[in-house]
Image (cartoon, coloured by chain):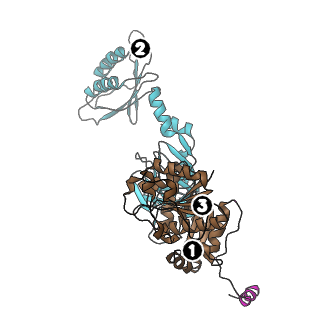
Chain colours: A brown, B cyan
Amino acid sequence: MGEAIVITSGKGGVGKTTTTANLGTALALLEKKVCLIDTDIGLRNLDVVMGLENRIIYDIVDVVKKRCKLNQALIKDKRFECLYLLPAAQTSDKSEVTPEGMEEIISELKQDYDYILIDCPAGIEQGYKNAVAGADKAIVVTTPEKSSVRDADRIIGLLEQEDVDPPHLIVNRIRNHMVKNGDMLDVDEIVQILSVELLGIVADDDEVIKASNHGEPVAFQPNTRASIAYRNIARRILGESVPLLSLEDEKGMFSRVKKFFGMKS
Amino acid sequence: MKFIFWGEPIVIGNKQLITIKGTRDGLTLYIDDSCSFDEVLQELEQVLSTKYTDKNDPLITVTVQLGNRYLHKNQEEELKEIIRKKNKLVVQSIESNVITKEQALKWKEESDIKVINKIVRSGQVFEVKGDLLLIGDVNPGGKIMASGNIFVLGSLRGVAHAGFYGNRESVIVASYMQPSQLRIADMISRSPDYESDGVYMECGLIDEEKSKIVIDRLQVLSQKRPDLNGFERRILNG
């Protein structure tokens, strides 16, 4: 019996879809059987980020409306045998999917998959309610900006009323130099305000955007900072305890020696 | 100037039903609580008609002490009507030692302290009657309201409204005070436009001289709001 995790944020553009794609990839790298569900009907993106857009035949609305079997709508990933995507519809209306319909799909998927990651649309209306309906757990993504933390707080409040475990937090797109200058909220501050458990932090990395545009999630790359961060988060989802990645730049021997002598690095 | 003999006993059938006492603030009528209400009315009519005052005298305020007698609203009106008929007499208050269960429960609710254990997040509003003791934070965008005082054992970063029925004596106390707004009764103060750190262990209260909400160390409360002590005390003081 698998586990359904909804990835949500309230605010748009903080990296829900990127996070979903990368955590899915990272879990698949760890040889788990994973299904990604895009619930952002009308504005589907997850298929693009995964590079699977050209393979879509049926979508989630077709499944809910019983125009096809669930298995027919699932798309197998290019790279992994154990990673699947259930794409959102691009042309239908949000109201075509109901929370009951979602619950049905997810309980069916739970039979076959270890993890079901649900990419939630921005906002707190129908789309959000659909996405949360079948979930057992929730991951809230935020960036170190006040507005995004505010929305995350709102979403956490709403999730507390749902039948899900207390949500976990991912702080995305941290720019270390701005945090240092005090121009950006630091992670401790965010965790203190939201008072939920921190699942991981992801630094702002150009590679993420490059990889998305190539339809290949960054987690697939061996050693960029963001990919390591996503893979660490995946390991934490599996229950391993992995220390948080340092945001500091790798420093050469020389600067370390200077630091040792108490000189400014 | 005619003389009125304050405290003069009115005896009917060897039993004194109404005692009138004069004080600096006016008259106090003590009404026996073991006779019937009709007797009281009769008696009152009689007692007050024997007394009269000069046209030029100032208005006299009357306080009625009912003892252990309970009066309905219309009975109170009857009583007031009789007193009001007399020139120069104004009923200031009718006091009784007894209240109905309903009133008592309402009273208890309004002076009770409610303990709430949760985080009030953005978009959430939490409202109680009486005092609020919140064990948790109020996040930015969250709001707590109480008809009495507010005590936050945690960080207050959102909006807090104390005394929302108009009690200007209410206070807001927080372990960490960084509110976006403080409201007490009908007054509002907001946080400054520049970035500011919060303060620890402080309270917000209305400064009547400056007629605005001030934030001060919570130690000043013992001087400025001595009535804050305890529930029983507030019951006794009403």
Amino acid under disc 1? Ile
Identity of the residue drawn at 38% across and 12% down = B12
Residue at the disc numbered 3: A34
State left or right for residue B175 relative to residue A101.
Answer: right
Q: Is residue B144 magenta?
A: no
How many discs appear?
3
Q: Residue furthest top?
A: B13
For the residues bearing labels 2 and 3, Cβ distance under 8 angstroms: no
The residue that appears at 46% across and 53% down in the rendered structure is A130
Instruction: Say what amino acid the circle numbered 3 marks.
Output: Val
Tell me residue B7's x, y (percent): 41, 24
**Vertical arrangement, residue A39 with respect to residue B36, above or below:** below
Q: Is residue A76 visible?
A: yes
Disc marking residue B35:
2
Camera-near label (2 vs 3) is: 3
Q: Do callouts 1 and 2 mark residues in contact (Cβ within 8 Å)? A: no
Mark 2 and mark 3, same subunit? Answer: no
Label 3 neighbour load within 10 Å: few <14, some 14-19, many 20+: many
Look at the magenta stretch and give its main secondary structure.
Answer: loop
The verdict on a common chain for dots 1 and 3 is: yes
x and y percent of residue A31 in the render? 67, 64
Q: Chain of mark 3?
A: A
Quadrant of image for the C terminus of chain A: bottom right
> Residue B68: horizontal and vertical position, in percent?
46, 22
Mark 2 burial class by Cα count in 10 Å: few <14, some 14-19, many 20+: few
* Residue B77, label in figure: none
Which residues fall within the magenta stretch?
A239-265
Spatial distance from mark 1 to mark 3, Cα to Cα? 27 Å
Q: Which residue is mark 1?
A: A174
